[in-house]
Amino acid sequence: MSFAKQYLTVLLDSRRVIRSVTQQTAPLKTGSISLYDREVRVLCFSFVDEAGVAIAFAAGGAFDFSVDAVRAAKAESLLMAFVDDAAINDTDDWADADPTAGKIGVRVDCATDLFAASLDLIDGEADIWCQLRMFPNGETNPCTLLIDSGFAYSNVIGRYVP
């Protein structure tokens, strides 16, 4: 199955999405991570250094990705979405996904009741925070590759069922 894709460049030093190496901040709501209720989306991250050269990650690492409407979630709060390693770097989702080439693909399932309930609490549009972590091969402590804001939206039709 083919899912909607969003292509994003991440400057590893800042751990943020950028428009280009020469313009290192993404414009408001354009170029930022965008997720939609009742959609499965593949975020296609290309990691670069200050010169725009791809960052190669060591083979064999594991990844996870989380989304929430607050930056520092409390222990009792639930994430809007969590993606474990099984849904990251699947070449059926993004043929170019290859951490050794600095390309990490993340399939985010926003078609969940928890994602929808989170949007219902904030009138259908939310500033969100996203974090991508890598657990290097054999390590138990992760390193953060991305921590950045984005936007989550309800669909126009929403959850209408005729």
Image: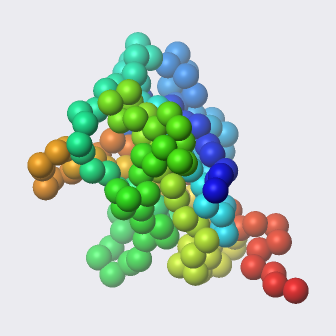
Here the colouring is: rainbow
Give the number of callouts: 0
Q: Depth check: give the residue in front, 71 or 78.
A: 78
Residue at the far top: name it.
51
Residue 47 visible in the picture: yes
Q: Is residue 85 above or below residue 100?
A: below
Locate the N terminus by quadrant: bottom right
Q: Residue at x 37, y 49 (%)?
A: 132
The answer to whether residue 70 shows anywhere in this view is no
Image quadrant holding the C terminus, namely bottom right
Q: Residue at x 27, y 50 (%)?
A: 62
Q: Position of residue 66 (x, y in %)?
A: 41, 60
81 over 65 or under it: above or below:
below
Question: Residue 116 at what x, y percent from top left?
Answer: 62, 76
The quadrant where residue 151 appears: bottom right
Residue 125 as seen in the image, left or right of residue 83: right
Determine whether 84 is above or below 159 in the image.
above
Residue farthest to the bottom, as pictured? 162
For the view shown, which residue lies furthest in the right direction? 162
Quarter-wise, where is residue 94 in the image?
top right
**In the rendering, at what x and y percent does residue 47 appear?**
41, 30
Relative to 157, is 50 on the left or the right? left
Query: Nearest the camera: 67 or 102?
Result: 102
Q: Position of residue 69 (x, y in %)?
A: 50, 65
Which residue is depicted at the point 75% across and 79% down? 159
Residue under the point 82% across and 84% down: 161
Residue 135 vertical placement versus 10 (above, below): below
> In the image, 112: left or right of 81?
right
Between residues 64 and 75, which one lies in front from this camera angle? Answer: 64
